[in-house]
Image (tube, grey):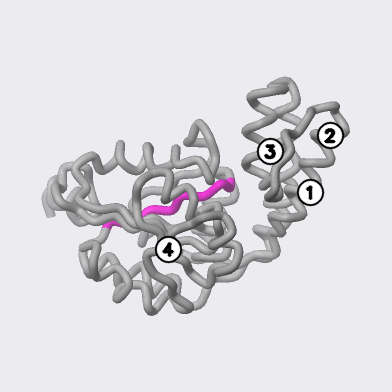
């Protein structure tokens, strides 16, 4: 196989009209005891304890939103703040399990001609650890972590990295479990497929859902309109 042929098989940037499926990691491809609400509560307590005023809002703050706020309003606290999710993530990754049919779904998408990517708010250490542990890396063309972006989901900056890899892609679809994934996809102008997502919270957050699936085996059919 020639180098250009390998690029095409691996979803190289030279392929025009390519469809990209972008996955969240936690609770989408892998399951872990990572409690994002607990992380957010701890970060909120940290911010308030350091005298950072949090603007009033109707909905709870997520950990990524708090971290972005701290980087803007109190940048000197950012290294200490990011240590909070890092500690939670390191503990959780040791107990991660593979989501049912994750490998099968990724393999099926590759056979259908999709390029595949992961876009996670976890750092590179966590992403590489769990993807390697469950042998998912061979099924993926790109992994975007918080080390690669300027802002975290629900900001759409991760899609900038995806589009830089595949500038001629004909379609990009995001698959994830949470409102954070949905709003990031929406802000980036791409469809969102909810995998076992909390329908009430997605609605409350104003997320538009292109499709809902309860099993990753249903994903190829849900992606039929985006090839």
Mark 3 Cα-neighbour bin, 10 Å: few <14, some 14–19, many ≥20: many
Mark 3–mark 4 distance (CA, rounded to whole Å): 25 Å
Q: Position of residue 152 (x, y in %)?
A: 54, 40
Q: CA distance from mark 3 to mark 2?
A: 11 Å
Residue 149 higher or lower than 86, as above or below = above
Which residue carries the number 2 mark?
48
Distance from disc 2 to disc 4, alpha carbons, whole Å, reads: 34 Å
Looking at the rendered structure, the secondary structure element under dot 2 is helix
Which x, y percent locates residue 51?
85, 27
Q: Are marks 3 and 4 in contact (CB under 8 Å)?
A: no
SS class, disc 1: helix
Q: Which residue is mark 3?
A: 66
Where's the C terminus, which quadrant? bottom left
Identify the residue shown where x is 34% and y is 51%. 190
Label 4 residue SS: loop
In the picture of the structure, the residue carrying the numbered disc 1 is: 41
Q: Residues within 10 Å of mark 4 (few under 14, many from 20)?
A: some
Look at 77% across and 41% down and name the residue there.
43
Disc on the earlier residue, 2 or 1: 1
Q: In terms of sequence position, does the residue under pointer 3 or pointer 2 come before the other?
A: 2
Pointers 4 and 1 in contact (CB under 8 A)?
A: no
Q: Could you tell me how far apart the alpha carbons at marks 4 and 1 are, in whole angstroms?
A: 27 Å
Does dot 3 land on a helix, a strand or a loop?
A: helix
Of residues 195 and 81, the one nearer the viewer is 195
Q: Give the numbered dot on residue 209.
A: 4
Q: Which residues are magenta?
A: 115-122
Q: Is residue 226 left or right of residue 55?
A: left
Asked if residue 119 lies in the magenta stretch, the reply is yes
Task: Give the tally of numbered discs.
Answer: 4
Give the image location of residue 186, x and y in percent: 42, 50
Graded by Cα atoms within 10 Å as few (under 14), some (14 to 19) or many (20 or more), the crowding at tag 1 reads some
Q: Position of residue 27 (x, y in %)?
A: 57, 65
């Amino acid at each position: 196989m020639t180098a250009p042929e390998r690029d095409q098989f691996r979803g190289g940037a030279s392929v025009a009209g390519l469809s990209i499926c972008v996955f969240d990691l936690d609770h989408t491809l892998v399951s872990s005891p990572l409690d994002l609400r607990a992380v957010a509560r701890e970060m909120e307590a940290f911010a308030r304890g350091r005298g950072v005023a949090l603007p009033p809002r109707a909905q709870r703050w997520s950990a990524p939103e708090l971290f972005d706020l701290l980087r803007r309003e109190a940048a000197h606290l950012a290294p200490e703040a990011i240590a909070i999710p890092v500690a939670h993530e390191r503990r959780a990754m040791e107990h991660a399990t593979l989501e049912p049919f994750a490998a099968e779904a990724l393999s099926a998408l590759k056979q259908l001609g999709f390029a595949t990517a992961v876009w996670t708010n976890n750092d590179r250490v966590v992403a590489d650890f769990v993807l390697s542990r469950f042998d998912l890396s061979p099924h993926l063309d790109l992994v975007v972590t918080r080390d690669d972006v300027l802002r975290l989901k629900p900001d759409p900056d991760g899609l900038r990295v995806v589009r830089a890899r595949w500038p001629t892609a004909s379609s990009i679809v995001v698959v994830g479990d949470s409102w954070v994934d949905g709003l990031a996809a929406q802000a980036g102008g791409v469809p969102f497929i909810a995998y076992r997502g909390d329908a009430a919270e997605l609605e409350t957050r104003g997320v538009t859902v292109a499709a809902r699936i309860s099993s990753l085996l249903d994903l190829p059919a849900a992606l039929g309109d985006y090839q």
